[in-house]
Amino acid sequence: MSGHKVWSWALLFALLSVLILVLGVLAGGSGWIWPWSTDFTNADGQVLAQILWDIRLPRGLGAWLAGGLLGLAGAVAQGLFRNPLADPYLLGSASGASVGVGIYLVMLGASVADAGWAHHVGMTGSAFIGAWLAVLLTLALAGGVEQTLRLLLAGVVVGVVLGALVSLGALMRPDLLMAMQGFLLGSTALLGLQACVVMALVLVFCLVLAWAMAPVLDALTLGELTAQSLGLHMFRSRLILIAVLSVATGAAVAHTGLIGFVGLAAAHVVRACVATRHGALMLLSALVGGLLLASADLLARWALPSQELPVGLFTTILGGAYLLWRMQTLAGRTR
Amino acid sequence: MMPAAESALQAKGLCVALGARQVISGLDLHLPRGHWTCVVGPNGAGKSTLLKALAGLLPSEGDLVLHGQSLRLMDRRMRARALSWLGQEQAIASDLRVYDTVMLGRLAHQNWFASATAQDEAAVKSALEALHIAQLRDRLLIHLSAGERQRVLLARAFCTGAPVMLLDEPLSNLDPPHQADCLDWIRSACVRGVSVVTVLHEISMALQADTVLVLDHGRLVHLGLTSDVSTREAIENVFEHRLHIAEVQGQWVALPRVGTPRVSDPR
């Protein structure tokens, strides 16, 4: 019975995602473009084709993939740390990515004006390396992956200290803060086809690994020792799950900057729809994460005519409003 | 005197330290096959720690032998198939369904990516029926009462099909009819050759077991048949004679010795 429900919801989220992606391709800053009534053979038409297939499509698809990665990472984090408030940035990856981008900008003396492709690749690479180094630092401080509480505390320490470093850098170099703003608020504007391919590969890889580790997360809901008593290799499983969490988060952050609430809210949306085990929960969370970020991306483009707002602003509004509503409904139920 | 029977689980010189504190000190143990052994002792005696150590869930020193094989050298999955452990950890936050929770007990029998076999389904169904929770199978664990949840966790432990079961406070939160169901299941499991070790703080329930192990300050004080006078004396001793064991309608019952209020008490 639960299996049918899961597939029904998966189908619904997938259809909604396709709808949002199609809308994202048709509408944008330069207005609506209707491919079936546009002549792509003349010069104007070729420009429109470029806008459709080289800008809007990779952007919408990229936003969906980044959201999928964050949704999956959020479900993994909440299962692994047995905490419904856990989010993908828990192990310090967000602050690490910010420091990475900050260092890149300082080293190259880059500014806001540098919006070229090479600059984007440099930002992406440094964010990914920064996120990974921060996770490794968290693991080193926690003395491994065996103790959940130590990991959580180490993640908080790394997040706070690296966050302070970013603030210090911004204080000393105000121009740096300007250059980093797009990254800190999250942006889907520069997503290209290459980024989509990288994120799609990472998403598939992480989904397969997460699916294999799903029984571990199910068992962990009964406690650490019970999971161990069921014959699970907890050390190895934790290591794999943390790798999934970090790779998925790193890939998303590197391409879109810091996008809040998607990772936290996606798994909660799924739980409100269907009660299921972690395998299906993670798959559905990836779908919902993608749907959330693609929708936020669309809103960011549509909200103000002739001006684009940061997508992170909309994920925060959407995710925050949803969690607030969920909090109210839960409070009503327990009263 | 303990009967000489085939050993299911043996411990020799078992020592467990939690931090700097020695919780179990040099414990020798022989748990016969098809017997129900109950561990009793005052709070903090090391009963739960002993069960965790016997299950291989805590770092310990000494020999642990399960059906003639060293427990420490056993593969994790093989160990999980041979030994089932139920702890006192409460899964209040679990948002799994009852059926999925019980099915976790079959995890060691399943391959990665493979779905549950007919044998797994049958084991889960049998455990759900034995504990009268078949009608709850699609409910979420977080939506159950404490007693219902305990029955689900018991079903999870029972459906493993393990020949050795270590159950820490299996009767907690259960009402008398469900306590009786649980004890019936343990008894019938023993008849099938399963060895059961329980930790129980209700001494009257503990006296239903075949054998009682009395633990105090991490040391084995007594191990003997429930029917032996020396066993009952050992229990009364370890609880400083604050309880009295009497026979009521053919069953041993532990009654607390309630002191007379002192007149000189200030309030």
Image (spheres, coloured by chain):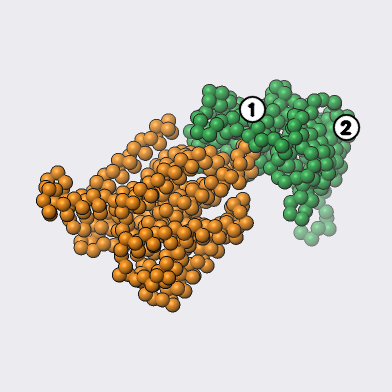
Chain colours: A orange, B green
Decide: is A140 above or below B141.
below
Q: Is residue B146 visible?
A: no
Q: Is residue A12 visible?
A: yes
Horizontal and vertical percent position of residue B30: 81, 33
Type of residue at label 2? Val
Mark sitting earlier along the chain (1/2): 1
Decide: is A38 above or below B153.
below
Decide: is A125 above or below A210.
below
Left of A103 or right of it: where is A51?
left
Q: Quadrant of the C terminus of chain B?
A: bottom right
Secondary structure of the residue carrying tag 2 is helix
Secondary structure of the residue carrying tag 1 is loop
What whole-number distance in Å separates the C-alpha atoms at marks 1 and 2? 34 Å
Horizontal and vertical percent position of residue B149: 58, 38
Type of residue at label 1? Gly
At x 42%, y 32%, the residue is: A3
At x 72%, y 23%, the residue is: B193
Residue under label 2, please give it.
B229
Residue under label 1, please give it.
B161
Decide: is A62 above or below B106.
below
Left of B132 or right of it: where is A331?
left
- Which residue is more in the foreground, B132 or B242? B132
- Which residue is more in the foreground, A36 or B233? A36
Q: Quadrant of residue B74?
A: top right
Horizontal and vertical percent position of residue A11: 34, 37
